[in-house]
Amino acid sequence: MKEQLSSIKQSAEKALSGAIDLNEIENLRVKFLGKKGDLTSVMKGMGKLSNEERPIIGKLANEVRTFIECALDEKKDALLKKAKAAKLELETVDVGLPGKIPSTGKRHPMTTVIDDLNEIFIGMGFTIAEGPEVELDYYNFEALNLPPDHPARDTQDTFYINENTVLRTQTSPVQIRVMENQKPPVRIISPGRVYRSDAVDATHSPVFHQMEGLVVDEGITMADLKGTLEVFIKKLYGEDTKVRFRPHHFPFTEPSAEVDISCFNCGGEGCRICKGEGWIEILGCGMVHPKVLENCGIDPDKYSGFAFGIGLERVAMFRYGIDDLRLFYENDLGFLKQF
């Protein structure tokens, strides 16, 4: 039996020296010290020993058990330390490396343009007014002197929710709502999204932005309109910018005009951007039609006013030299990061 115990000790020592992971350690513990292990099997045979041999073999068996248990613990601790060291090595942070700069967002070019125009008009005494994008036909058309059979409706074909409700084709309905609820003097701008049933191409979109302005008070004339727009345009494009008013027709203003500016690229000499004309159209305007004032409960004999409308995508395209309106809405980060 002494030989068996010595053999078990040597086998355990050799097996533990070659163990490489914790699972193997546990398997060796079961092999040598488990209920059916090698050492347990030997100790079960001690009942056959004489009284003189039993204490000697028992002492030797306990020494072998203690040796194996200590060897198992030492090997387990060594493997745990090795695994921890490997994990720390893998997770080491090199504090000398430069940090990663987090990606930050920027304002969309359309937002920048809208904010800049708001700032100009607020500095001129205007306030910002807002209204619903889903609008009643009355506010979008009829109150603006566009009855159901008016031919001008054909150029503003919109998206109908039902017979009396549309997605607004312009921000002019905001002006009607303001005049219904606020007696003159009125001086507002109304920036926002508008919708028209246009096919998508480089210069058209079914969703775009407008900013319209309205001034109503006693004694307002065309001279006030021209002066206001000239100040605005020079603040936006520079003091050297020339302004030209051309007669036009809008159902809700009379007289009406289109406003051109001298081409900021060629200074009026003619180039690709202005199509060789030297002028670029930027907005429409006019004196508020007396019928529109009447529709809002304002006496046209006492009050007069002017209104104007600006396509904000066009302003942004001119400012940044963009030749395709679709770029504003494609969420291309490569494009947007330029601004």
Image (cartoon, rainbow, N blue to C red):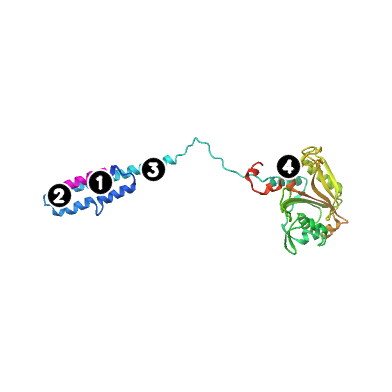
Q: Earlier in the sequence, mark 1 or mark 3?
A: 1
The numbered mark at residue 68 is 1
Whether label 1 touches label 4, CB < 8 Å: no
- Outermost residue, right side: 301
Which of these two is toward me, 219 or 77? 77
Q: Are marks 2 and 3 in contact (CB under 8 Å)?
A: no
Q: Amino acid at mark 1?
A: Ile
Q: Earlier in the sequence, mark 2 or mark 3?
A: 2
- What kind of element bears circle 2? helix
- Which residue in the protein does label 4 denote? 319
In the displayed structure, 116 sits above or below 44; it is: above
Secondary structure, magenta segment, majority class: helix
x, y percentage for residue 302?
87, 55
Q: Is residue 14 magenta?
A: yes
Residue 145 visible in this rendered orientation of the protein: no
As measured in the structure, the alpha-carbon distance from the residue carrying label 1 to the one carrying label 4 is 84 Å
The kind of residue on which mark 2 rests is: Pro
Q: Residue furthest bottom?
A: 163
Q: Amino acid at mark 3?
A: Lys
Q: Earlier in the sequence, mark 3 or mark 4?
A: 3
Which residue matches tag 2?
55
Question: Mark 3 or 4, which is nearer the eye?
Answer: 4
- The answer to whether one can see residue 210 in this image is yes
First-in-chain label (2 vs 4): 2
Three-letter amino acid code at the position of disc 4: Arg
> Mark 4 falls on what kind of element?
helix
Reading the image, the residue beneath label 3 is 84
